[in-house]
Image (cartoon, rainbow, N blue to C red):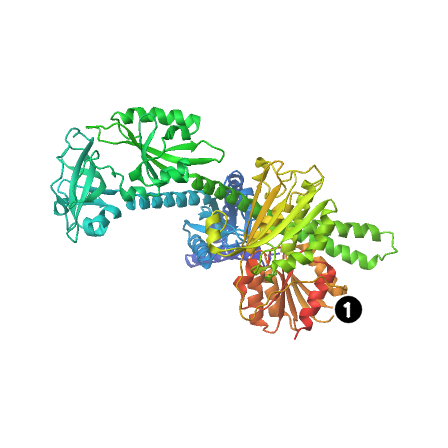
Amino acid sequence: MIGWGRKGQIHRVVFGAFALGAGIILAAALNAGLVGWPGVAIAVAAGAGIFAAVYNVEVLRPLRRRRLSADLVGALIESVDGAPEGRVITDTGGRYLYGNKAYNELSGTLAGNPPTPLQLPWGTPLEEEKIQRLAHSVMHGLSADDEVFLRSGIGGGRWLIVSAHPIPGADQYVIWYLTDVTDQHEIQEMARLEDSLRQDYLDNAPVGFYSVDGKGAFNFVNTTFAGWLGYSPFELMNGSMSLDEVMEPGVTPEDDSDQDGGERHRRAIFRGRNGDSVLTELTEVVVKDAQGAGFYTRTVIRNLKHAGAAVSTKAEDPGRFGQYVENAPIGIALVEETGVVVEANQAFKEMLGLSDGAANSLSNGLPEVTNFLECLKDVDRERVSALMAPIATGGRSSGPPIEVRFDGKAERSAQLCLSPIGSHVVPEPGVIVYLTETTGMKNLELQFAQSQKMQAVGQLAGGIAHDFNNLLTAILGFSDLLLLRHQAGDSSFADIMQVKQNANRASNLVRQLLAFSRQQTLRPKVLVLTDVLAELSNLLRRLIGEKIELDMIHGRDLGLVKADQGQIEQVIINLAVNARDAMADGGTLTIRTDNISRVQSIEIGATVMPEGEYVLVEVTDTGCGIAQEDLEKIFEPFYTTKEVGEGTGLGLSTVYGIIQQTGGNIVSSSAMGEGAKFQIYLPRHKPQADEAATTEAAPAVPEASRDLTGKGCILLVEDEDPVRTFASRALRNKGYTVLEAINGGAALDIVTGYEGEIDLLISDVVMPTMDGPTLMKHARELRTEMKCILISGYAEDEFRQQMAEQEFVFLPKPFSLKQLAGTVKEVIEKK
């Protein structure tokens, strides 16, 4: 029997063709007078030919095409598996078929089908539009690629080159390539920044630069030189002015001793826009083109003085450094070949650590003979001495700056340049030393590297904490469900309580990880730290024991701060416990508060905190101290100096995270045998008219057990199966009707199709395809009266600022059955 599906349709076409062909030929035969068996034979033969042709088109060719397509896709899958970049095969309808390991890791999927490129969490509508354009191109048989930013969870992302290609011979399939180019992006950004810094240095250097061609037209002028003349660089370089128009004949003849690409030295007077003359010293190099016909110059200009003043030689001018050198921010000194300092400016003296009496003006010289080389470390002393000898006898400058370190207890460094006093034609004995202190810059580099490392560790810790919060929500929730069936007298009760108690301990560790990564939810309020510490003092005395004395010193008129009181108390407790462990034989724990003015913050330095007003909390102990190598790592998570099993390594990392998230900073200092000091700087808060300082008192009586049952219809959206299963069972147990959805799309289908009222939407924040905030927005467009609870293992602050106009309640993970039921009841009953 011929079927009625695709096969039946083919059969009807084939046999119909056969019958039609045979009938036509038979009619023709009869018309030609061929009757009987000859006509029938001709008709049958013709029908068979048409049958074969149609069968080849309708049956054999599609079968061969499908077989070819399947073989081709199989070969593609083998090539996809071995590729280092992310590759995924989809059909033209956007359905996922196969992706390699790199793609699965990139999309954040460890099990099940990952999202297709069309479904990945691209950062902005612009990125999504790029992906749609790629899909549109491939639908029309064209390959295409683009650079796209992929949002990876909350607070991070990657740059990718995404390309889509149709598969020849298998038009219904598409292969996507996703190549991570984030590192190249960062390298390009660093190169751009370096170019900008170099350009800024060249443009605003304390010397002038220009370049002219053979006709005297300016090719380049820096801002410094143009400013001396009262012009902008553009006015000099736009072709309207030449070198001859701004330069008068030189004060000294041109030095032609080195014409073939070498340096030429001379003095020249330039005329400014307002008629002033500027006396300069030029160092010039003439560069010829490849043919030797044309040339251009590279010229460095030193501004000596205005031409109207008398031109004195160095020997005739005892104040030759001048006031501008005296006040220069870099150290400048004239030294003998042996290193003895003859003259030096204020900055140079301060770098060498001379006494206040020695810090007088250059015109008076140095009151004591100081050997510059003796101020350097041994290795640098030998290196600089070797460079100075040839320069002092007429050699050229030392070239690029070299790094040197000063001798002494404090680690200090500087960049050093050496240059001769006279020209290489008429040398003068001695060397000019230029010193630029780099100690602060080196410290900034170290702090930046440490900050980058802490940020990376924080992002990792935050991601781990989020995943653990999902697991702990399920563990705590199912423990609560078990406890409903196993009361205190049950033999399983103690075991279940052990599970729940250990889950709560794990929850505290996760909270510390979130504190370190600055992803916890804070409840800031205006606080008087004096009151907070006074309330905490009794607890601190019990924690540190009788052998340790607690000394609290409060500053007068202490400023207000805006912070989470519980978290600030956690910081003080963690520091106090560490201090107790460091004073096993007793000692003193001192907690001091004080105001830090704007001027004091500037003196402390931008490396510790930006300029502003702060409130200081200083915690000092008289314990054993912290080794320098440990001091650099104490704020890293899981780093501890205690014995195995005695500490988690999260105490100080939690302190660091809380203070950073509050907007402050914490600085530690210590030495072995001298105790440790931790200084916390919190921004001073200027309260508004309706704000008042408060402190939280501990509740005197625990809240009485209340009825958590209720009625209503709840739509629960959660992509983690264990969390969704626990929450739905818990809510049904309390009397609610629960509708479940695994993602935002399924939830919107329920919102659209469900005929009854939906009183409350409970949604996870981070989900594939559509996140919780987006779902809430679309759902409320359909049901305006629906209330909403968002749940997440991330901090509320991560997404709250993006949803200022939306009203919702946030329930952080992990939560217990009682917390879930209590929050739901409060939200549903709230008018």
Q: Is residue 509 above or below residue 530?
A: above
Percent x, y of residue 201: 32, 44
Q: Is residue 672 above or below residue 146?
A: above
Can residue 642 be spotted in the picture? yes
In the displayed structure image, the side of residue 792 where residue 729 appears, left or right: right
Q: Quadrant of residue 672?
A: top right
Q: Is residue 472 above or below residue 349?
A: below
Residue type, mark 1 in image: Asp
Percent x, y of residue 618: 59, 49
Q: Nearer the viewer, residue 198 or 626?
A: 626
Percent x, y of residue 334: 30, 33
Can residue 42 be spotted in the picture? no
Q: Secondary structure at mark 1?
A: loop
In the displayed structure image, the side of residue 205 where residue 650 appears, left or right: right
Q: Nearer the viewer, residue 326 or 605?
A: 326
Q: Quadrant of the N terminus?
A: bottom right
Residue at left offset 79%, top offset 50%: 498
Q: Nearer the viewer, residue 521 or 474?
A: 521
Residue at left offset 68%, top offset 38%: 642
Instruction: Give the number of marks.
Output: 1
Q: Nearer the viewer, residue 415 or 554?
A: 554
Q: Quadrant of the C terminus?
A: bottom right
Number of other residues with Cα within 10 Å of mark 1, as a class: few under 14, some 14 to 19, many 20 or more: few
In the displayed structure image, the side of residue 6 where residue 142 appears, left or right: left
**Residue behind mark 1:** 707
In the displayed structure image, the side of residue 203 where residue 241 appears, left or right: left
Percent x, y of residue 322: 26, 42
